Amino acid sequence: MPGERYFAVRDRLAELLGWIGSLADEVGLENDSEAPPPVLSRPVLIAALGEVNAGKSSLLNALAGAELCPSSPVPLTAEVRLYRHGAELDHHVEPLLVECRRPLGYLRNFDLLDTPGTNAKHNGHATVAEPFVEHADIVLVVFTAENPWTAATWDAVSRLSPEALSRTALVVQRIDLKQPQDIPIILGHMRDLSVKRVGHTLPIFPVAARLALEAKGAMPAHPELWSTSRFSDFEHFISERICESMERRQLLHDAWHHAARTLRRLEARFDVQRRGMEDDAWFLSGIEREMDGLRDASLEAAPHALGAALERYRSEVDAVVRNLWSKLGWWRSLARLFTGDGSAAEIETTFAARMQEVATGFARDDAARLADSCAAHWETVRPRVKERMGFEPGACAVAGTAWEEGIERFVGRLEKAVPQALASLRVRGVLDPLVRSRNASLKGFTAIGLLLAIAAGICGVTAIQQPAILLLGAALAVFAFAAVTAWITRGRIAAGYRERLLAGAATFADGLKTDHGEAIRLLFRDYSSSLIEVRRQLAAEKAALTPRLERSNSLYIALKSVELDL
């Protein structure tokens, strides 16, 4: 097909423009209204002029390689016919102009204009054909080898504008009907007429279109038939005219420069996006530093916060000691001498349960305080993110429905630390030996008192009054001494236990300190996840930018390779 080199470059440019346009649409790059993309798809227009039965239709058929235009010794072309690519359809654009759509591959690149004869009876043909001829890429003026000096055709050539003449070639058809020695004479005569009519010699090509069409359709190929048609030089001329056409070359250059400009605009857009993403990343890092600062401040204030737990601890110690004081009363102690004494275990169990409550209450209050602090900070972050990055970052990860879950995790962390903190106090089992020793003393005094009372009773029964009174007095004295001992030992045990527990307050707080700090870190880790959607958005933008940059670079390299062909 003629002009393959031009069409290859054109198609490559059109493909690149399509890919570049797709990338521009993808990133929302607006079209440059001052420099719209050139239309590369406009086919090459070849117009054929000549007298009736000069062989114009046959010539166009030979170019297309198919029976496109009806041809016959009898004149068949009664109107101007423009053959274009498309589903088969004939449409009368004007009374004397028919647009003929045909699904022929050749017509993807060429529009073919077939005209009635220059000597046709209807005068309106020339008026319809003139605009097409003046703007045609190639004008073929067809003569027959039998009569190459027809006046009507030469008059039509004389009426062509200088611009149209620069794109005009003369074609002498049906040379297969003449003797080889006649051809140079005919061509010489044509050159003379060309100089006489237009002032210079136009390109002249003797051809046999019928033989060329047969050669193109021959299977297998028929080189001799093709050589006889002399169509090769003619198609080579068309190729050169297409490839060397200043208008067509300018069209390719305009398309190339448009593609290059668009790529530069895309590169500038990507550069802005890249810098914006870097700024966004730095902006998010600043917010994360704020979160870290809030966390560090909370960790520094943790010992002070644990002071509230110590206050609760001390108040619970007082309550436990009061309970112990009550359980060590005289009458209760006397009753347990006969029923067994488990008060030490009860007190220790009560103390452990109260310490668990202390840790839970403190953890809940402290977690709520920290979560509210995070939520308040997030309310300052949200508008900044929206203003800087253009989208809503979402809710705080430790507020709303997640508030209770975060507090429960915080509480659970400290609850697990309580048993170990209590174990570090070393108070379990301290109370039981003291209570047992006290009970043993009270049991001895009680036994002695009872024996003395029994002896007094026996003496009383036997009417020995004096010893009975003495024994009874001794029994009362023993019981009184036992009561005093019980009161004194109760106070000592309660005071000693209280002192032991209060001395362990710092130890208890230290036992919670590590887990309290870890709970704070975990809560702030949850809070920092509030930015995860923002980070994902930024990562998605970066992930989308990378292949776009690669595509842009690939398109630039491809465009540079096309530049070499230009």
Image: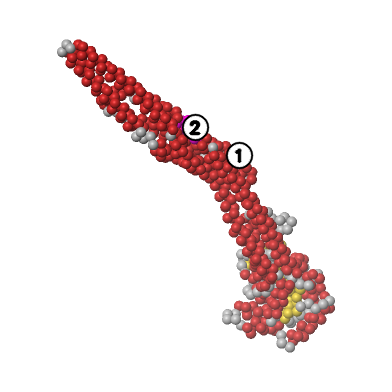
Which residue bears the numbered disc 1? 380
Q: Nearer the viewer, mark 1 or mark 2?
A: 2
Q: Secondary structure at mark 1?
A: helix
Q: Is residue 369 above or below residue 487?
A: below
Q: Secondary structure at mark 2?
A: helix
Residue shown at 61%/61% (left/top)? 550
* Disc 1 residue type (three-letter): Thr
Cα separation, mark 1 vs mark 2, equals 29 Å
Nearest the camera: 515 or 543? Answer: 515
Residue shown at 62%/69% (left/top)? 104
* Disc 2 residue type (three-letter): Ala
Q: Residue furthest left?
A: 462
Nearest the camera: 466 or 287? Answer: 466
Counting other residues with Cα less than 10 Å from the Cα at mark 2, is it few (<14), some (14-19), or many (20 or more)? some
Range shown magenta? 305-313
Corner quadrant of residue 450: top left
Which residue bears the numbered disc 2? 308
- Which corner quadrant holds the C terminus? bottom right
Q: Is residue 66 above or below residue 269?
A: below
Q: Is residue 381 magenta?
A: no
Nearest the camera: 496 or 71? Answer: 496
